[in-house]
């Protein structure tokens, strides 16, 4: 996998985009937000 940082506003935000690898053609914002939210719920239940 190869990524490139395409936006950087320290310390608030950065954007990295995969230029080579399995996620190069996807925008993962919704996916990642859902993943983090569901993972947090799962860990809170334990």
Image (tube, grey):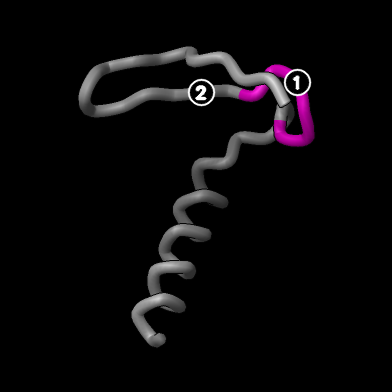
Measured along the vertical axis of the image, is residue 12 above or below residue 5?
below
Classify mark 1: residues with Cα within 10 Å, few (<14), some (14-19) or many (20+): few
Left or right of 40: which side holds 25? right
Q: Secondary structure at mark 1?
A: strand
Q: Secondary structure at mark 2?
A: strand
Range of magenta residues = 18-23
- Residue 25 or residue 3, whichever sits in front: 3
The residue beneath circle 2 is 16
Q: Position of residue 31 (x, y in %)?
A: 56, 51
Residue at image location 40% in from the left, 86% down from the top? 46
* Callout 2–callout 1 Cβ contact below 8 Å: no
Left or right of 39: which side holds 3? right
Residue at image location 58% in from the left, 41% down from the top? 28
Residue at the bottom extreme, as displayed = 45
Measured along the vertical axis of the image, is residue 35 above or below residue 5?
below
Q: Position of residue 9 (x, y in %)?
A: 27, 17
Residue at image location 40% in from the left, 15% down from the top? 7
User: In the drawing, what numbered circle is on residue 29?
Assistant: none
Label 2 and label 1: CA atoms lie apart by: 12 Å
The residue beneath circle 1 is 20
Q: Quadrant of residue 13?
A: top left
Q: Position of residue 20 (x, y in %)?
A: 75, 20
Q: Quadrant of residue 44?
A: bottom left
Left or right of 10: which side holds 25? right
Residue at image location 45% in from the left, 53% down from the top? 33
Classify mark 2: residues with Cα within 10 Å, few (<14), some (14-19) or many (20+): few
Is residue 44 a member of the stretch shown in magenta?
Answer: no
């Amino acid at each position: 996998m190869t990524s490139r940082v395409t936006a950087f506003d320290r310390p608030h935000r950065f954007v990295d985009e995969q230029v080579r690898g399995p996620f190069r053609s996807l925008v993962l914002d919704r996916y990642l937000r859902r993943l983090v939210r569901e993972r947090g719920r799962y860990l809170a239940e334990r």
